[in-house]
Amino acid sequence: MEKYLYIALFAPLVSSMFSALFTNGAKKQFVGVVASLLIFSAFVSSSILLSNILNGGEVLHVEMMTWMKSGNLYIPFGFVVDQISVTMMMVVTLVSTIVHIYSIGYMDHDKGFNRFFAWLSAFVFSMMILVMSDNFAGLFIGWEGVGLCSWGLIGFWFHKNIATWAANEAFIMNRIADLGMLIGIFLVYWNTGSLQYHLAFPAMAHLDTSTLTMIGIFLFIGAMGKSAQFPLHTWLADAMEGPTPVSALIHAATMVTAGVYLVIRSNELYSLIPNVGLFIASLGAFVALFAASMALVNRDMKRVIAYSTLSQLGYMFAAAGLGAYWVALFHLMAHAFFKALLFLGAGNVMHAMHDELDPFKMGGLKKVMKGTWIMMTIASLALAGIFPFAGFFSKDTILEVAFSEHHMIIYGVLVFTAGLTAFYSFRLVALIFHGEERYKIFGIHPHEAYKFMLIAMSPLLILAMIAGIFQEPFFNMVEEILGAMEYHIHSHVTVWIMLVGTQLFVGLAILFAYKKYYSWGSVPDGSSAMENSFIYKLLYNQYYIPFAYKEYVMKPYNDISAIMWEIDKKVVDASVDGIANAFYLTGEKTRDMQSGNLSTMLKWMVTGLVGLLSLAAVFGIATRYSDEITTILSGLGV
Amino acid sequence: MEIGLNHYLILSTILFAIGLVGIMRRKNLLLLFFATEILLNAVNIGFAAISHYYGDLTGEMFAFFIIAIAASELAVGLGLLIVWYKRHGSIDLDTMTSMRG
């Protein structure tokens, strides 16, 4: 089994290095093919590991080699394949295989084709390290690795200013959160004496609550950054400047769920501190609603989906915070499938519309893009949580958890958000695929994506439809490790009322969206009453949070930097330059010694000889009479 | 008065000082070689005297080495000097300043 672990881990690395060989050359189709095959082999290995776990095999725990060993500190390059990491591995490798294949078509005309695959595979490798590591240090390496690759991929089109800006924003925001996470990791080591999960978590049971709370909060700050939770959420929407496959893989299916993974992985810690858990759940519910409300009015197709990702991450945190770790993990998995599908569909639309992102400028695309239309509709149904698609099972379980744990506010917020989710998803579908063909005004001739791209997407389509049937086996698999409990609401009537009620509510939201946007005829130009209302403006400007960050964080920081720069120039640079200038000056002045006249130079040589000899004499005498000198000096009171 | 080690060392020092002054003051390349020889032989006297004083042959061996090396140095130096004289017609040190920095 060990060899499959290594294949799953290192195939992406090989793929990345292979692609990196060609980064400076012209586009080569085989680079994409080889990369896809290698990632696929990682997927196959992960599947074998999964079937091993499912058939009751041992949890695989290997130590590849020692990484740090010094005194009491021992951190190996250790990897563990247990129920949690194998789930994550499956999600990561499956989605990344599909995204790799899809990208062969999507990046077809891009000059950076080879470079793209190098970054993308490097991302998969980092993500595999993140989920497979058996200690916090390895997790942190993967954590930083995915951050770096995310930076490289958001800023993939670095000739666009806005893309590099978004890349830097994502990187810097994650650094802020990573500081919190690093402090959390230090605290773990400080208090438990180990960073390996199987030693650190059992040791935590003996710590006092305040220490545990500190650890829990600091680790969660890291998770907040990576999973773009409020108030560090602005980078995710801006990250949509990257190529769409990147958004599908990194900013929807895998990397942003790393925060949820961290909370699930630390379940033993968080179940000891339910107060922090409640905070996580409340923040999750808040973000779910907050992000969904921003998605309602946004006029950028990818940003709408990005906000919906944020919102769904909120759901996951709500579940994890309430102690239902397996539900969070299950929603993570289901969400990865339908959200990646949604993004890849959006990529098809973008290609067809020549990178136009405003759904109001599309309309009626279902005639030309039948495949994409079906896929995006089903993905939206799954996202909205309509029976029998994937989202129904995972999301409904989260609602049940909130209800049975008697957190009615969280429950209410989540149900309401489910309605909003349905509304904005179908607003998008209706605007893009139905109604009048508004794109004709702009002289665009849309076309369907390559066939193989659609075929590559089809596994996601199937999973988005049927992932619900995995709920039972999944529960049985992770039950042992996540201490999973089934959430039973005692009265069957209540369950049915909740179920049907939610479905009706969501269904109505969908109908409302269709009714409002199905036959949309014009492109809004900012003159309608709705667009001038306060709420619309508030939502459209993302609650003015990016504005506030710019005004109250970035500007003062820039001002301080300007002052610091002056100080730097006048103090630090001046002193360094001063030293250098002194050397130059002595050189300039003593140049005359080098007259080229042998006689003069011999005189200098003799002067040097006499100088050195006298020095030697002085030191010799000083050493010889050192005691006497000390006595004299002490007599003088020195 | 018996002649002891100190006398030899004083002689050696005086010779060395004469050589040093010669090195500094002489402008003629040939005389510069003479001064160098005086320097080397001053050291040789010192070596031989101390070697005799301690009854150890090492110093004398060193003196032989120095004589041999001085001879070869002089051979090369005189060769160069003759070439220089043929080219420039002068062996005045003040005219040899092509290495001016």
Image: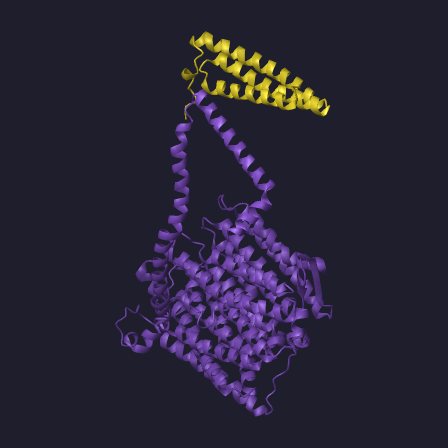
Chain colours: A purple, B yellow
Q: Residue furthest left?
A: A527
Q: Residue furthest front?
A: B1
Is A335 left, or right, of B98 in this rendering?
right
Quarter occupied by residue A136: bottom right
Is A621 left, or right, of A563 in this rendering?
right
Q: Is residue A593 above or below residue A375?
A: above
Q: Is residue A200 above or below residue A627?
A: below
Q: Residue at the spot x=71%, y=25% of the render?
A: B54
Is A3 left, or right, of A532 in this rendering?
right
Give percent across and percent down for residue A528: 27, 74
Q: Residue at the spot x=70%, y=21% of the render?
A: B52
Give percent across and percent down for residue A609: 52, 29
Give percent across and percent down for residue A40: 61, 57
The one of A260 and A48 positioned closer to us in this rendering = A260
The one of A498 and A519 positioned closer to us in this rendering = A498
| Quadrant in the picture for the N terminus of chain A | bottom right
The answer to whether residue A336 of the structure is visible from this angle is: no
Total number of numbered discs in the rendering: 0
The one of A453 and B66 positioned closer to us in this rendering = B66
Give percent across and percent down for residue A447: 42, 58
Q: Is residue A267 above or below residue A364?
A: below
The answer to whether residue A339 of the structure is visible from this angle is: yes
Quarter occupied by residue A458: bottom right
Q: Residue at the spot x=60%, y=55% of the render?
A: A12
